[in-house]
């Protein structure tokens, strides 16, 4: 009988290009220093899932992985999920789960470790959760680091690791509250906006592409625009897309008034919070005291961590 296996996959942030990436524009994705762990062990009982969230998604993921690999699922397993990634906050928790459960199944079945396959099965699982995702979230959970990602068509996605030459400044994540909408709903909200005002939305995407390329040049030491200006420009474009709620906009304006900058990361949220925001201030104490005054959770974040791995 196979032994116990433990796999982890990272959460993510999007430095630039969320939503636009669904329409074939580029995005820069980075893995974050918080991880989701999946442990699979043989069990005497039928499938037993221990998870604070997404038991159904775990079961679906397992079935999908088994199907794709033409392996049996009628095995008695105990699956335990332990995650540091906030759920429904734009940090790719479902993608990390999809990738980690697939990779754990690979390892449990002693199949050769194949990142390309793990990623493509992870994508199929993500579709169940997000409808029409770009493929970006599972790709960064699989490969980690910093990725330049572009979906040219459903079958042709281009991504390449970015070799960071200029370290990013110290960045923080601030929790603006859980969005009332799912990623799927936010993606379809942008879709309706796009269908109604195609030229207007394409203009926003084109501007977004310019900012994404400027971010790329920034980390390659080819750009002079200060980091915080890029962050601000990016956020304003996301606001024009209608994916940032008024309470989140207020928080971000507050940070800007202090001389800092912040942007949402991921699908955003319109009615309640907009998930986590990526925040910068040249004097981090200003951000910390801002968050404390407003009773907002704030964390320092490390980016560019390893992708899916055996623990
Ligand atoms: C979600 O993390 C990012 C979106 O661009 C959707 C996607 O890429 O699938 C909003």
Image (spheres, helix red, strand yellow):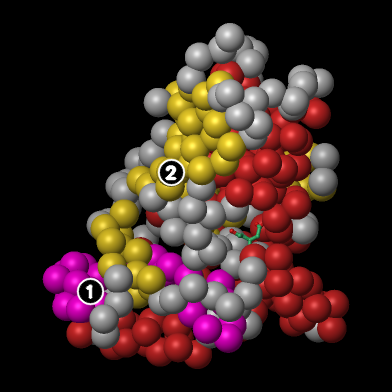
Which image quadrant is residue 287 in?
bottom left
Q: Secondary structure at mark 2?
A: strand
Residue 311's x, y, as percent? 40, 26
Q: Position of residue 230 (x, y in %)?
A: 43, 68
Q: Which mark identifies residue 287? A: 1
- How crowded pointer 2 is (Cα within 10 Å; few <14, some 14-19, many 20+) is rated as some
Q: Is residue 25 magenta?
A: no
Magenta extent: 268-292
Q: Position of residue 292 (x, y in %)?
A: 20, 78
* Contact check, label 2 and label 1, Cβ < 8 Å: no
Q: Residue at x 62, y 21 (%)?
A: 106
- Residue drawn at x 54%, y 64% is 88
What residue is pinned by disc 2? 82
Which mark lies nearer to you, 2 or 1? 2
Judged from the image, the quadrant occupied by ligand 1 is: bottom right
Q: Quadrant of residue 35?
A: top left
Q: Would residue 125 appear left or right of 269 to someone viewing this image?
A: right
Q: 262 above or below 48?
A: below
In the image, is residue 31 above or below residue 299?
A: above
Q: Is residue 260 left or right of residue 212?
A: left
The number of numbered badges drawn on the structure is 2
Q: Nearer the viewer, residue 200 or 154?
A: 154
Q: Quadrant of residue 49?
A: top right
């Amino acid at each position: 009988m196979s032994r116990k296996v433990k796999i982890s996959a990272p959460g993510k942030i999007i430095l630039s290009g969320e939503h636009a990436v669904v329409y074939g524009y580029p995005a820069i994705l980075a893995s974050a220093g918080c991880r989701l762990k999946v442990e699979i062990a043989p069990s005497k009982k039928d499938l037993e899932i221990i998870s604070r969230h997404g038991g159904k998604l775990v079961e679906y993921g397992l079935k999908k992985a088994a199907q794709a690999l033409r392996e049996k699922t009628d095995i008695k397993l105990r699956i335990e999920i332990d995650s540091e990634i906030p759920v429904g906050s734009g940090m790719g928790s479902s993608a990390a789960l999809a990738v980690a459960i697939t990779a754990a199944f690979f390892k449990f079945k002693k199949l050769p470790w194949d990142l390309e396959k793990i990623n493509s099965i992870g994508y199929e699982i993500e579709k169940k959760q997000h409808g029409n995702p770009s493929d970006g979230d599972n790709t960064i959970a699989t490969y980690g680091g910093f990725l330049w990602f572009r979906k040219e068509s459903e079958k042709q996605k281009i991504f390449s690791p970015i070799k960071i030459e200029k370290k990013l400044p110290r960045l923080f994540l601030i929790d603006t509250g859980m969005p009332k909408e799912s990623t799927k709903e936010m993606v379809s909200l942008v879709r309706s906006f796009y269908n109604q005002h195609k030229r207007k939305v394409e203009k926003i995407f084109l501007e977004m592409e310019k900012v994404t390329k400027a971010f790329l040049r920034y980390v390659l030491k080819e750009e002079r625009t200060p980091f915080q200006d890029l962050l601000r420009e990016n956020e304003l474009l996301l606001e024009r897309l209608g994916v940032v709620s008024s309470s989140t906009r207020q928080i971000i304006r507050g940070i800007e008034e202090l001389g800092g900058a912040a942007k949402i990361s991921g699908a955003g949220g319109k009615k309640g919070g907009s998930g986590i925001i990526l925040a910068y201030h040249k004097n981090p104490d200003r951000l910390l005291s801002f968050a404390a005054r407003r009773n907002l959770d704030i964390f320092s974040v490390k980016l560019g961590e390893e992708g899916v791995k055996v623990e």
